[in-house]
Amino acid sequence: MTWSTPATLRAQVQRLWDRGELLRARVGEGPAWPLRLAFKAPTAADLADRFDAVRAWAGAVTAAAHVRFEWREWAHRVQGRQRLPVAAFVDSLADALAIVGQARAAATFRTLWDATAAAQPALLPWLTRRPLPALALADRWSRLLAVVGWLRTHPRPAIYVRQLDVPGVDSKFVETHHGVLGEWLDLVLAADAIDATATGTAQFARRYGFREKPLRIRFRALDPALPTLPGCRGAPDVTLDAASFADLALPIERVFVTENEINFLAFPPVARAIVVFGAGYGWDALARAAWLTRCGLHYWGDIDTHGFAILDGLRGHFPHVASFLMDRSTLLAHRLHWGEEPLPIRHDLPRLTAAEAALYDELRFDRIRARLRLEQERVGYGWVTAHFGGAPLA
C-alpha cells in the first residue's frame, strides 16, 4: 500500500525545513500559502475491494495535526456514499513550523535577521542563502556582527588579531570563525580593504589587513670560517624571520635544504655553505631571498612521491634547484630501510628532470614495490658524507 501517511506528509514539510525554505518564509521569502502537499489516496477500486483498509487509512491520515484535507464523496455499492480525503494542505507558515517542531528556532532566526538588518544590512542576502548555518551561529551572532562592524570602522588595521578590541572576542574566536567572517567581510568591506590575492582561511589575516606571524627560517653555517652573528662561534644554529633572511649577506656558494631536523643538525661540513631546515610545501619564506638565485641550491627530501612533489614546488620559486640524494642508486642501496608511503600522489610533476621523473614514475606507478618510500633520515651517514668526497656538486 502506497497511500499517504502522517509520516510521509511530515517528511515533505521537513524537506522544506532542511532546504531553509521555512526560515526564508519567516522573513518574507519562501513557499506560497496554503501549500499543497503531494498526496496519494485510495482509488475507487480500493474503496470497492478494501473498504475496511481504506476506512482505517482515512482515520489515521486525517489525524495528522496542522494539515487541512480536501474531501470527496464516493458511492460504495454496499456501504453507500462515503467521504474520503483526496488532497492535503498546510495553510500557513505557523502550521508548517508546528509540524516539524521548529517554531522557536524560526523565531530565533527572525531575531537574527532583525539584528542584522539594523547593524549590517549588506549581510541579509547571506542570511537568505544560508539560513540554517546562520541559525547554528545564533549564540555567537552578536559577536560576529561586532567583529564585522569593527573592521568596517578600522579597515586594514595593521594589528595582530590578538589586539582586536571587541568585547567577548579573542583571537581564538576569530580563528574558529575565519570561514563565516571571510564570507561576511567580502560582502561588507570596500574593495580596497581586501587583498584579493590572499585566499582561503589560512590567509585570512593578509586578506583583511591584519599583521601575520612572521615566517621564520632556521639555518646552520656548514663552514666555521663563515662570518657569524655577534657572540656566536663555530657553525651556529640560527633562526631569522623571512625578511631578515632575505637581507642576509654571507659569502656562501651553496645552500642545502633538508626536511629532517636530525639531518639538518648532523649535516657534514661544507665549504662556503649553509643548510636550511625546510618547510615542506610552504616555500613563501624562502622565495623572498633573491640571493638564493645566485647560489647553488640543493634539496634533500624523502624518496617518495611527496618528496618529489615538494621538490617540484620548490622549483616553482627557484628553477635551478638540484635534488640531492634523491636518486635511484641511493634508493636501491638502502633496501633494508625501505618503508611504505601512506597516501602516495599520482599526478604529473612538470618541473622534474628526466632522471627524477623516471624515478617518480617508478614510485607513483608501484613499479618497484607498492607505496615505496625511503625516508631521508634512513640514508646512511657514510653515504651522505661520501657524496662530498668526489666531484663537487653542480
Image: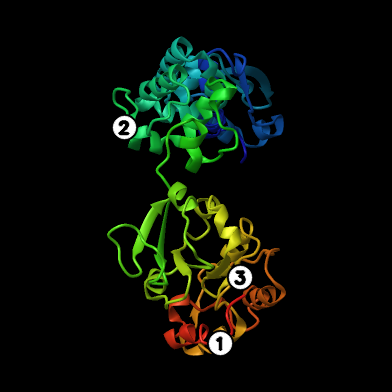
- Among the two numbered marks 3 and 1 on one chain, the one whose residue lies closer to the N terminus: 3
What is the x, y in percent for residue 348?
Answer: 69, 64
Q: Are marks 2 and 1 in contact (CB under 8 Å)?
A: no
Question: Dividing the picture into quarters, in which one does residue 238 lie?
Answer: bottom left
What is the x, y in percent for residue 237?
Answer: 35, 64
Question: Which numbered mark, 3 or 1, is in the foreground of this view?
Answer: 1
Question: Dividing the picture into quarters, in which one does residue 371 lie?
Answer: bottom right
Q: Which mark is residue 322?
A: 3
Q: Is residue 113 above or below residue 78?
A: above
Residue type for callout 2: Asp
Which residue is pictured at 30% across the width and 62% down the height? 232
What is the x, y in percent for residue 382?
Answer: 44, 88
What residue would you read off at disc 1?
A: 390
Q: Are marks 2 and 3 in contact (CB under 8 Å)?
A: no
Residue type for callout 3: Ala
Q: What kind of element bears circle 2?
A: loop
Question: Which numbered mark, 2 or 3, is in the foreground of this view?
Answer: 3
Which residue is at the front of the view, 221 or 65?
A: 221
Distance between mark 2 and mark 1 Cα atoms: 57 Å
Distance between mark 2 and mark 3 Cα atoms: 45 Å
What is the x, y in percent for residue 309?
Answer: 60, 64
Judge the density around disc 3: few (<14), some (14-19), many (≥20) Cα neighbours within 10 Å.
Answer: many
What residue would you read off at disc 2?
A: 170
